[in-house]
Amino acid sequence: MPFARQRLRHEFAVRHVTVRRVSRIVPSIVRVTFGGKDLDGFASAGPADHVKVFFPDQQSGMLVVPTVTPEGIRPPESGTPIARDYTPLAFRPAADGDPAELDIDFVLHGDEGPASAWAVRATPGDVVAIGGPRGSQLAPEGIGRLILVADETALPAASKWLDAVDPSVPVTALFDVADDSVSAYLPAAIAGRVDARWLSRASNSGDPSGASPVEVALRALGPIGEDTFVFLAGEAGTLIPLRHYLRRELGLPQEQVVASGYWKRGVVALDHHAPVDPSDPD
């Protein structure tokens, strides 16, 4: 069956925002709540929307951002922007005297990258800039079942998918994580209605083919009906065999499977719009 998905366009803006709160959700993920008048007009309606977060230089403290003009986006006159893409987890517009707030979750991996290095030290009052989102693609209409496959970087998108579908829709979530400590990520109200399986990628799946635990679990789900929508997101290389199984072995159509590489080992600032498998694009 076709899955109709409405697309919305947003006026692009680069917003300077200030850290209001920092919360450690699980040992490897920190939630940063941003505020500021620049959030007026912010919109994010899709479960897999992305914003670009611009970070200050760790050495100079300088925050370099592009400028939005009537003619388009103009690069900065000096300096190089330091930016990474993130899913906006939750946005609360200003209401009843309370200021607007935006939550973004950051996966911590030491000082290996500028985003993690900033997030592990983030404190109230720190300033970053946020660009976008340029648009939103809403959840498909007519979903009879939802299958989610996500690693830590895609947990915010998985959470938004759960909010986007009717609570009556059965959901199976296969989470490809470093260890069991991440299993506390989902709020209890959501976790109770999801068949969530937290699969440690460090464990040996026991599969003679050498397939990862998440691939073994996906194959074990059995037949996937035409009313089932599948969303895959995380490390691009890990997603290749999963997508191949769904699209080539099961023959599911393109509109039934979305696979998005949020990062890739050995690649800095991966373009998440790029095909997960360049050798087998849709």
Image (cartoon, rainbow, N blue to C red):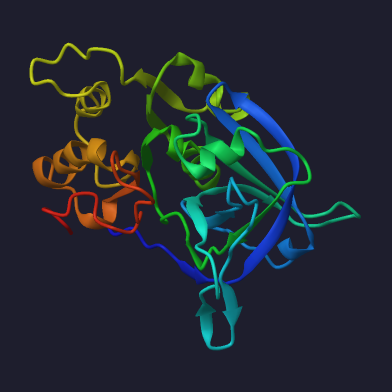
Question: Which of the two residues, 256 or 106, is positioned nearer the viewer here?
Answer: 106
Residue positioned 49% across, 21% down in the render: 182
Where residue 185 sits, quadrant-wise, is top right
Outermost residue toward the right in this view:
97
Residue 277 location, x and y as percent?
Answer: 18, 50
- Residue 164, compared with residue 158, is above or below; it is below
Q: Give the left or right position of residue 150, taking residue 209 as reference.
A: right
Residue positioned 17% across, 11% down in the render: 206
Residue positioned 74% across, 64% down in the render: 38
Which of the image's four quarters has the C terminus? Answer: bottom left
Residue 4 location, x and y as percent?
Answer: 37, 62
Q: Give the left or right position of residue 82, taking residue 147 as reference.
A: right
Specify whether residue 9 is in view: yes
Residue 207 location, x and y as percent?
Answer: 14, 15
Outermost residue toward the bottom in this view:
71
Q: How many marks?
A: 0
- Residue 225, compared with residue 50, is above or below; it is above
Q: Give the left or right position of residue 178, taking residue 81 as reference.
A: left
Outermost residue toward the front in this view:
60
Residue 255 location, x and y as percent?
Answer: 27, 57
Residue positioned 52% across, 48% down in the render: 164
Q: Give the left or right position of residue 201, taking residue 92 as reference.
A: left
Specify whether residue 167 is in view: no
- Residue 282, compared with residue 154, is above or below; it is below
